[in-house]
Amino acid sequence: MIRIQSAGKQFDSNWVFENVDLQVRTGGSAAIVGPSGSGKTVLLKMIAGLLTPDRGEVRVDTHDIGMLFQRNALFDSITVIENLLFPLRERKQIIGTPARELARQYLEWVGLGHVLDHMPEQLSGGMQKRLGIARALVLAPTVVLYDDPTAGLDPVTSRKIADLIRDLQSKAESASGKKTTYIAVTNDIHRAYQLGDQLYLLAQGQLIQGGTPIQVRESRHPSIRQFVRGLQEGPLQ
Amino acid sequence: MREVIAFRSCSKSFGKRSILSDVSFSIAQGEIVFVLGRSGMGKSVTLKHIIGVMKPDSGSVEVLGKNLAALDGRGLSDLRRKCGMVFQQPALLDSLTVFENVSFGLRSPEFVQSRRDAGLKPLSESEIRARVLEVLGLVRLGTEILDKRPPQISYGMQKRVSLARTLAPGPEILLFDEPTTGLDPITTQSVNQLVRELSRKLRVTAVVVSHDMHCALQIADQILVLDDAKILAKGSVDEIKQSQEPLLIEFLSEALENLREVEPA
C-alpha cells in the first residue's frame, strides 16, 4: 500500500506541488501523467524515499522498492548480467550460481537472455530500457516505480515495454507469492492507458484523480480533457 | 513544383549493417514531409545526408539543385546555411539572453560573408533587432522575454526560441529532428501546429524526422516510412491511412484513435 496525504515539496521556496493525495492499493497500479516540469519525477522520488516531503506524509508499507530511472542509470563499464549481479551481491549477499541463475531468469523475462555478456552501450534504446527494468525488479521489490519508462522510444517499442511491465507484475507475483504494486509516470497518454488501473494528472501543483482508462478517455474534467486531447485552449498553460 | 531534395538510389552501410538500401525519393518546394520509422531505421542518417554530414556509399543526394558529392567545403557550408536544423533539445546557450541567442547566427562570420557574396552589407544593430522581433513573432513569442535567459522560461518557450534562432538567417529548408518526442500532448500539438504555420507562411520546405504518426497525419503533405533500410511506404496522408502493411497498421492504430478523439467528427 502506498498512501500520500497532503504532501508538498518545495525547491528554493517555490512549491512544486503543495497538497497531493494519492493511494494505491497493494497489487494495484497507477499511472501519473502531466506536462514536463509538473513534478512527476519529484513525486516518484518522494515515494522512493530519495526526497522528503516538506509538508504532509508519504507512507509506503515496505522498504523493498525498485525504481527505473528516466535514463536507466545502468553501469556502463560492466556487462548486462553484471548489472544485475551487482545489486544481488551488494544488497542481498546472493553470489555465485544462485545469483547467476536469478539474474538470467529476469533477463530472459525481459527478452535479453541472448545478450548476457554484452556491454550496455551495445544495446538499442529499447533493450537498455529492458535492462533497466530487469535491474529494478531483480531484488523482488514489492513496490516498483517507473519514471517515464518509454521516453524517447518509438511507438511500437514503447507499447511493447508497457506490455512487458504489466506482464512482469503478474510474473513477479507468481514467482514470489507476494503482490507487487507499481506506479508509472509518463507524458504519453496511451502508455498511461496501458499501464495504470487508475490514472492521475499532475498539473499546476494539483494531482487530479482521473479514474480508470475508460473514465479518463471520456472525462469532462477540463484539465484532463485538455491534456488527453492535446487542446491548446483550457486551464493548462 | 520545384524539386528541392532528391535521393537517387542511395545506399549507406555501417560495417555489415545496411542502413539505406537503394533509397529514392524527392521533396518539392514548400512540402511538409515526415520521415517515420522505428528507432535505428535510418531516419537521422537520412537527415545527415541532406546536410552533407554523411555521404551515400552509392547513389546521389541533390539539395537545392546541387549534387552534394560535387560540392567543396565552401559549397557545402553555403548549402548548410540554407538548411535550418531544429534539434530535439532546444540547445540554447544558457548564459545568453533570448535576444542574444536568436541574434547569434545573424552575427556569425559565415552569415556576414554570405551577405557580402550577395552584394549586401552586414546587418546593422537595428536591423538585427528588427529581424529578431520578426522571427519571435513568427513563433508567437513577445518582446517581454527578450532579456530573459533560457532557464527562466518554460520548456515549451525554449523550443520556440530555438526555432526562432533557426529561422533568423532565413533558411529555405527546415529540418526537424524529432521535434515532439518526449513532449506532453499539449506541447506536442502546439509545436506541430507551429511547424505547419511556419511552412505555409514562409513557404519553406520542412523535413520532419519523427516517431509521431499522429502529428504526421495532421500536417504532412508526404509521409515516408523507413524500415529495414528500405522505404516501406511513401505517399500522402490518405494513401498512408489506407496502407495494409502490418508495421504501418501498428503505427497507425493509436494515431487514428487519437485523431478521432482530438477532432471529433
Image (spheres, coloured by chain):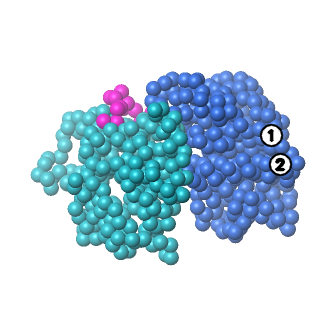
- Label number found at residue A191: none
Range of residues picked out in magenta = B138-153
- Label number found at residue A173: 2
- Mark pair 2, 1: CA separation: 9 Å
Place of residue A90 in the rendered image (x, y in percent of width and height, measured from the top left): 81, 56
What is the quadrant of residue B126 in the picture? top left
Q: Chain under label 2?
A: A
Could you tell me which secondary element the residue under label 1 belongs to?
loop
Name the residue at the right extreme. Answer: A177
Q: Amino acid at mark 1?
A: Gly
- The letter of the blue chain is A
Tell me if residue B151 can be seen: no
Q: Are marks 2 and 1 in contact (CB under 8 Å)?
A: yes
- The letter of the cyan chain is B
How crowded pointer 2 is (Cα within 10 Å; few <14, some 14-19, many 20+) is rated as some
Name the residue at the bottom extreme. Answer: B16
